[in-house]
Image: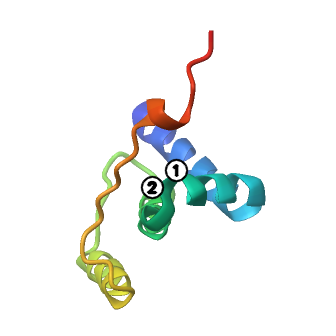
Amino acid sequence: MVEMNAWRGIFGTMRELLLDRDDFQRFVQHTLEDQYFAFEQVIIFVRNILTHSIDSNITLEKDSIIGQKAYLTDRKINRVHLDFVYAEYISARS
């Protein structure tokens, strides 16, 4: 349950940052370029799944997955492949 809550926090925070912080959203858009929309949709989808699960039995409804797939397909995204090498964009702190 602790691990699920940690992921819920990570995805929730990422979604809120993308929604509320223009500077952060621009940074992520610039970094991911054409991968941004798919990334944002994955963040929203997973955040919604985790937010609406109140115990460790996460259940994905078939209609939710079909709806998300249709939404992405309508926008010409047939496959989500995120290619982000952290070290290429964020320098190590010493």
Q: Is residue 76 above or below residue 93?
A: below
Q: Quadrant of residue 39?
A: bottom left
Quarter holding the C terminus is top right
Along the viewing direction, whichever of 78 and 67 lies nearer the viewer: 78
- Residue 87 located left or right of residue 13: left
Foreground label between 1 and 2: 1
Is the residue 49 above or below the residue 9 in the image? below
State the separation of the CA atoms marked 1 and 2: 8 Å
**Of pointers 1 and 2, the one earlier in the residue sequence:** 1
Question: Where residue 1 sits: x, y (%)?
Answer: 41, 36
Residue, far top: 94
- Comparing 18 with 67, the one in front is 18
Q: Residue at x 47, y 59 (%)?
A: 43
- Identify which residue is drawn at 28% across, 73% down: 61
Q: Is residue 21 visible?
A: no
Q: Amino acid at mark 1?
A: Phe
The answer, for residue 62, to whether it is visible in the render is: yes
Q: Count neighbours of disc 1 (C-alpha within 10 A) and say few if under 14, some if 14 to 19, many if 20 or more.
A: many
28 vs 74, left or right, is: right
- Which type of secondary structure does the marked residue at label 2 adopt? helix
- Residue shown at the point (26%, 82%) measured from the top left: 66
Most foreground residue, 89 or 1: 89
Q: Position of residue 44 (x, y in %)?
A: 50, 65
| Residue 25's disc number | none
In this view, the residue farthest toward the bottom is 74
| SS class, disc 1 | helix
**Crowding near pointer 2: few (<14 within 10 Å), some, many (20+)?**
many
Evaluate if marks 1 and 2 touch, with contact meaning CB atoms under 8 Å apart: yes
Give x and y (percent) for residue 72.
36, 80
Quickly name the residue at label 2.
50
Q: Three-letter amino acid code at disc 2?
A: Leu
Marker disc for residue 11: 1
